[in-house]
Structures are given as C-alpha cells and as structure tokens.
Amino acid sequence: MARRRKMAARKTRHKTARRMRRIPWRQIAVSTTAALLIAVFCVGLVFVLDRPLQRLSVEGDFRRVSAAEIGEAIRPQLNGGFVSVDLEAIRAVVQALPWIAEVHVRRRWPDGVRVRVREQDAIARWDGQYLLNSDGEVFVKVAPDAFMELPLLHGPDGSEARVTERFKALGADLRGVRLQLEAVRLDLRGAWSIRLANGPEVRFGRRDVDGRIDRFLQLAAGPLADRFNNIRYIDMRYSNGFAVGWRDEPAPNEEGEGKNANV
C-alpha cells in the first residue's frame, strides 16, 4: 500500500515537472510578431515623414546680423530630412556667430525649419576693444575707435560682471540728478573712479565705496548741481569731506593731489 502511494506521488511530480518545462511558444511568437510589426510601422512612418527640407525661416529683430548671413551659415546643416535634421547642430552654428545672444530652432511641418534669434544688446565698451552685454559678458571684439557712443568700462581680468553691475546701479542713481556716466574704472588695487559725460572725474577709492557714492549724490543734487562744467575732478576719499579740482585752477602734481585722502 505504501509502495503504491510512493509510485503515485512520483508520477504526479513527473507530470508537474513536464508541465513546468513546457515553453509557451505561441505566446512568444505573438509577442515577437507584434514587436516586429511595430518596429516596421515606426521605420515606415519615419521614412514617410522624413521628406527633404524645402523651407527655411529665419526670424528676429536684425540690426547687426542679417537673415541672409544666418541662412548661409546653417545651409550645410540642412542636408537631412524633416525628421533626421540635427536641430542642435543648427543651433550651435548660429550661436557661434558674433552678436547672437539666443537661438531657438524648431521643425515646421511639413518640410521646413524655423530659426528665431535674439541679438546681443551692447551696453558698454570693455577696455576699449570689446563690447559688453547687460550681463557683463564680453561677446565681440571691435576696433578701438568703434562704438565711441557707448560708455567705457575698465577693470582687471575677470571683473567684467562686477564692473557692469556697478555701472548699471550708479548710472541709474546719476540719472536721478541729471548726470550721465561716460566711464567706470576699477584698478588693480580695487579702487573705483568714474568720469561723467560732461568731463569731471570722481574718485571713490577702495573703502566705503557705497557710502562715498551716497555723499557724492547729495553733493550732485545740492551744492555742486550747477557747477559741473567748471569741475575737473571730485575726490570723495576723505572721511569728513571731499576735494574739488576746478578747471580754472592750475593742475596740482600727482603727489599733491589727494595727499590726505583715505583711499
């Protein structure tokens, strides 16, 4: 009796093992066929959609760069189709052009590419040979006598953004007292000075620069308001006062000028 039970149990285990080892070929075949059909459909769809490019649209507010220049630069990148064209390659080519600040590239159904650009906005010259944008970034080299209508900024290498921020803040303050900046300078020692559009140089030095600027603005709105045309320089590097050099006075030597100032 026990032997029969063991034999029955062994047969049951063999049948279960055979069922477990049975491979679902039909299910695998259906899944594989479906995957192949989807792949073929996708390839076919890309082939149908990837028609040759026929249209190029270049848009923007052009002042320094023309749409024709941009089109000529990116034409070698247009050898793909509507789907296969490399939009990032087009964007990189346009971004590398002088005066280009921002580029957006899109496909335009059914056979075109649209390129939209924004030009750089030059707000000042840097060291007399470069142009700066409003973020304090040098973006193009220019001739020393070009763009003379723009203010001149100067500073050590790597200080472009810092000087630009000072220029923008101080320029806004000076407009409030009807003055205009012509130049801003940061020297290697960290001393600040500016030149106004009507000629006077204003020296702020290295210490308490913001406080000295505030005192100068008070002077510009008060005692010196109508006298800037006759001023050669204003030295704010004094703890309790300031010094003024008048145009009708003899120019002192460099050693005597600002001798007692707190730089």
Image (spheres, rainbow, N blue to C red):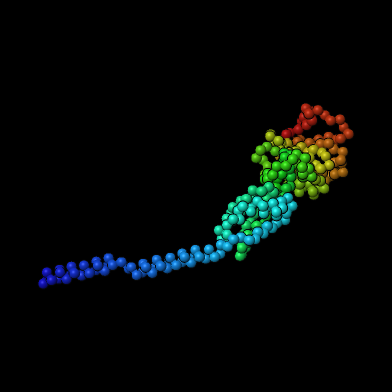
Q: Is residue 242 left or right of residue 114?
A: right
Residue in the picture at 76% in, 33% down: 261
The quarter of the image holding the C terminus is top right
Q: In this view, does 32 lie to the left or right of 112?
A: left
Q: Is residue 8 left or right of residue 22?
A: left
Image quadrant where residue 125 sits? top right
Q: In this view, does 22 lie to the left or right of 248?
A: left
Percent of width and height locating residue 88: 58, 54
Residue in the picture at 82% in, 39% down: 200
User: 37 and 146: which one is in front?
Assistant: 37
Residue in the picture at 11% in, 69% down: 3
Q: In this view, does 35 lie above or below 203?
A: below
Percent of width and height locating residue 188: 68, 34
Residue in the picture at 61% in, 56% down: 78
Image quadrant where residue 79 sits? bottom right
Percent of width and height locating residue 220: 82, 44
Q: Is residue 183 visible?
A: no
Percent of width and height locating residue 199: 83, 39
* Residue found at the very far right of the displayed protein: 248
Image quadrant where residue 243 sits? top right
Q: Can residue 249 be seen in this view?
A: yes
